[in-house]
Every structure is written in C-alpha cells, then in structure tokens.
Image (tube, rainbow, N blue to C red):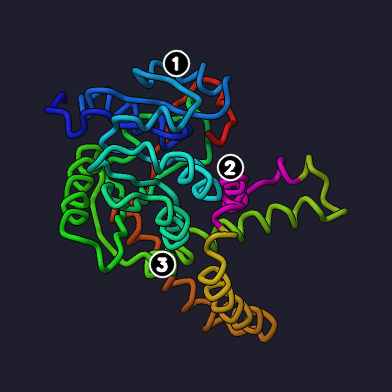
Amino acid sequence: MSQSPIFERICLIGIGLIGSSIALRCRRDGLAKTIVVSTRRKETLDRARQLNLGDVYTDSVSDAVEGADCVILCTPVGTFSSIGQRIGAHLAPGCIVTDVGSVKRSVIDQLKPHMPDHVHLVPGHPVAGTEYSGPDAGFSTLFDDRWLLLTPESNASEETMAAVQKLSEFWAALGSHIDVMDPDHHDRVLAVTSHIPHLIAYNIVGTASDLEEVTQSEVIKFSASGFRDFTRIAASDPVMWRDVFLHNKDAVLEMLGRFSEDLSQLQRAVRNGDGDLLFDHFTKTREIRRGIIDAGQETELPNFGRDVVQETD
C-alpha cells in the first residue's frame, strides 16, 4: 500500500539480497521519492537496472551519496572502512548513515572516524535473510514480521536519537519489528543466535565432504532433513560470513567456548549411556524450537523459479 515517502533520496550501497529487498519494498510502497543504487560490479549494476530496482545507478559511491537523506550500506562489513573514507566528505547535512551488517561494534569503529559532525550514524541489523545472494534474490516481503535491531552508541545526541526514530519508522514500513540495543550486547547475542550456527554448518558440511569413505553422491543421496538444513546455511555468501567472523571475533570465540563445553557434556552422556541427560536436553531444546516457530521467526521463501546471481554487492 502506497504511503507518503519517509525519505526523499535513499542511497543503497550494495544491491544483493538485503539491498534489493529494501529497494523492492520502497518501490512498492512509495517509501522514498528517489532510490539510488551503487555497486562496484558493472554486471551487478546492469542487472539491478534490468530489474528496475532504482531510479539512479552509479558505480561511484561518492556520487551516489550526494544529496541523500539516508544512506544504507548493504555490502560485507569488511568494506565499511573503505566506503566510509570515500563517502564522508560527500554526505549532506542531516543525512542518516546506517547499514544491514550482522556485527555492530566493528561498524561503528570503521565508519565513525570518517563521518562528519553533521550526519547521524545509526547502525542497523535486519534479522532476516536467505542463503541466496545478488539482486535477483530480493523480495519485497523479506522483512515482514522480522526483527530490525538499531544500535546507536549510548552517548548519542538528541539529533541522532531523532534519526533512530525516523529509521524505526522506515523499517516498520518495511514490515519489521523494531528493537534498540547496545552494539556490544548485540554482537554477543548474535554470536549465539546466528554466527555460531553458521560456523557449525560450514564445519559439518566440510567434515562430511572430507570423509573419504563417504562419496559426494552418498552425501546428496542420503541427506536427511537435518543435514539439508546445514547445507542450506552453509550455502550462504562466503565473503559476508568471512567478514562477520573476522569482525566479531571476540564474541564468537567467547560463545564458541561455551558451546564447546556444552558439546563435551553431551559427548560424555553419549559415551556413558546417560539417556536421562540426553532426553532432558533434547526436550528443553525442542521447546526452544517451538518458541521460535510461535514467534514467527522463520523465513518463508518465495518460489524464485530463476537462476540467482551470486554476487556480494
């Protein structure tokens, strides 16, 4: 349903799954008067143009942000320092600079040194996604009933908090539920709920591939639903996830230590035939799973019916 634009000129730097989904929803509901798309790859930019994702297309991030009242970084977090250096001097007064990365302290550390005083840095994280990437992967309902986390610094000014409110309005229009949290707390929470599961998925799929007595055809042929879920997660963009682990190292290592301790307990239960401990643990985790489903935190994918462009931006 069309509504009054929230932003006059929104700039999307990177046009993969998240960026293209934002563009499609903005276009569908009239959330921005002008959508600027910027990406470094010509073929990705051309594909975004073919899909009519924006109004203006450029491979120059400095040109892209000119006159924008909202800039959203949708590239892997390892690119943020370089992008910040290139766009800082070109940002309009009052512009809101945000992102969609899965880590937040690193985003602040990379971008803040390059942000002039007249702009507002408000890191963001839509807790939504699929294993697909590229401009073809986006769909306008990706953010419906998903959480969007905003992580301003604790000493943010009144003007920046007003920007938080405006971004909250924008993401609510995209379909999201909004929460505001401390950036360091965010990184610890997401290490448990997202980063460690991805690390486990990458590892177990790699382990299955490395086992000499299990051929690739057998892995595919006899994949049960559990392993298929791991392969889906392990199909996620490798550049993005490499950067996530490098830029949330401390929280990931802390939570990985906790996980290793709990896994050792289960290992002992299996070795010792402790069925009661296994049953109690599985019962507890099943209830957690039911809670996730009841909360609506599962993404239903549309039937793409087409090849997906595997690009990071």
- Precedes in sequence: disc 3 or disc 1: 1
The quadrant where residue 260 appears: bottom right
Res 255 label: none
In this view, the mark in front (3 or 1): 1
- Residue plotted at (26% across, 41% down): 95
Q: Position of residue 229 (x, y in %)?
A: 56, 49
Type of amino acid under label 2: Asp
Q: At which x and y percent is residue 307?
A: 57, 22
**In the picture, which quadrant includes the N terminus?**
top left
Tell me the residue that label 2 is attached to.
Answer: 237
Determine the secondary structure under disc 1. helix
Q: State the residue position of label 1.
A: 49
Q: Callout 1 environment at 10 Å: few (<14), some (14 to 19), or many (20+)?
A: some
- Looking at numbered disc 1 in the image, what kind of residue is underneath it? Arg
Q: Is residue 21 above or below residue 221?
A: above
Toward the left, the furthest residue is 4
| Disc 2: CA contacts within 10 A as few (<14), some (14-19) or many (>=20) | some
Q: CA distance from mark 3 to mark 2?
A: 21 Å
Please tell me the numbered disc located at residue 189.
3
Magenta residues?
A: 219-244
Q: Is residue 34 left or right of residue 133?
A: left
For residue 165, side relative to residue 254 (left or right): left
Residue at 44%, 32% in the rendered image: 62
The tag earlier along the polypeptide, 3 or 2, is 3
Q: Residue at x 77, y 44 (%)?
A: 218
The residue carrying pointer 3 sits among few (fewer than 14), some (14 to 19) or many (20 or more) residues within 10 Å by Cα, namely some
